[in-house]
Amino acid sequence: ALLRGQADEAYEADTVTAFDPSPPQWLPKPSGAARDFNMPALPAENEPVADFEAVRWGGAAAWSDTAGLSQEALSTLKAAAGIELPTRSTILYLLTGYLICLVPLNWLLFKLLGRLEFAWLAAPLLALVGVVVVTRVASLDIGFARRTTELSILELHDSYPRGHLTQFIALYTSLSTNYAVEFPENGSVVLPMGDFARARHRAAAALRTVRSNFGRSSGVALEPLTVYSNSTEMLHAEQVVGLPGGIVLGQSASQRPAVKNETGLPLHACVVLHSPAAGAIEFCWVDELTPGKAFTLDFTPVTKNNLWQRWEGRSSTQAARPESETDAHDSLWIGGLLHEIARKTPLLPGQMRLIGYTDDRPGDLEVLPAEDQFDGRCVVVAHLNSPPLGQVQPDRWILSRPVTSGMVPLEGELDD
């Protein structure tokens, strides 16, 4: 799949750079988005977006927890799970503020009221207020339950009814729980997601073992996966899923390009990107694409700001993470993933790509025991057509043995 190892490597026509943290920018960056790590300045409005040929970018078959998409999904899941451990300075500030309110301010207030004995009655109330404040500051707003948060990417090609599904899953539990992750077929894989920051705080991280069962009649299972009390475990899963159909690129009655959704998934906030020529990109907003619906495409050239207007109008798809607590929790924010895919995935001349999302849950992954709360969203990336193949050229990075012209003498006896 094209997106799996996104942003791991970048190849230019004449030079090779391993692990380049600055992948090519195929589309302009939306205003308000977080700055990419070590990313060069944006091109001017009329400057070509891509001025070199991407021979291979990211390692198409690589499993990576450090690629751009994986890291974007990991940061989104951390924010959605709501667990953010307070720093030492925050704890000291909270403790100091609580003691100041409990002793001098509490005593002074009831001293002025002339009812100093009530200061003892106010102490338990101040303790409850302190609990609420600490909960708000630490963002421990998940509740005492099992919760699953899932971000997934479904990648489709042409009109094929099968797609590659990448899932990033956060399992939270208030009490230590041994989970089992199961697939009904043997072609799927799942592993705990690597995170060096969490590994430093995980109990007995160096001694932890996970058992995976293969060859069973019921498929693949990963168990036991222990999640400790009030903590979150991240998972990375890959599988190929079957759908009723694909996203078909055809023509309308007016001989204009059109797309039809035959996947059975209701798609939202859809945009189709098209590269009519090298260095040129145009787009068409589709928005809602319900199952069985067809939409005629009318493309507009991309400028620096016109592409992102529809996504910026929704809190769940805007480039910057919502600052409002209501917006952040009413819907799972996927703007980071959408912009990561749209801006950094190569779009070759002649190619069309649809990007949107669905609130449905494709795939057959099952987590046991079942969660009490679930929040998930799936980004859909459909490569509507295959780009025309370029001229075949030799690989300059492979050392070839020179071959002399003419007949090569052979040793030994030969049969006629």
Image (tube, rainbow, N blue to C red):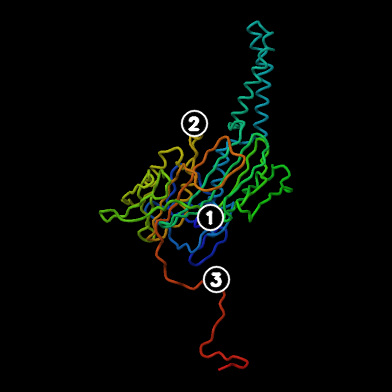
At label 2, the amino acid type is Thr
Residue at left offset 53%, top offset 91%? 407
Between the residue at mark 3 and the residue at mark 1, the CA separation in whole angstroms equals: 24 Å
Q: Hey, which residue is sitting farthest front in the picture?
A: 217
Q: Which mark is residue 116?
A: none
Count every numbered label the image shows and give the total. 3
Q: Secondary structure at mark 3?
A: loop
Q: Give the mark nearest the N terminus, 3 or 1.
A: 1
Camera-side residue: 338 or 175? 175
Question: Between residues 334 and 17, which one lies in front from this camera angle?
Answer: 334
- Tell me the residue that label 2 is attached to: 326
> On the picture, is 38 further left or further right than 318?
right
**Which of label 1 and label 2 is nearer to you?**
1
Circle 2 Cα neighbour tier, 10 Å, few/some/many (<14 / 14–19 / ≥20): few
What numbered label is drawn on residue 397? Answer: 3
Query: Residue 148: x, y in percent?
Result: 57, 39
Q: Amino acid at mark 1?
A: Arg
The residue at which mark 1 appears reads as: 4
The answer to whether residue 117 is left or right of residue 59 is: right
Q: Residue at x 67, y 30 (%)?
A: 91
Q: Nearer the viewer, mark 2 or mark 3?
A: 2
Label 2: element kind: helix
Left-right relation of 195 to 363: right
Local crowd size for mark 3, using a 10 Å CA cut-off: few (<14), some (14–19), many (≥20):
few
Instruction: List x then y, in percent, for residue 363.
Output: 52, 48
Q: Quadrant of the C terminus?
A: bottom right
Tag 3: residue type?
Trp
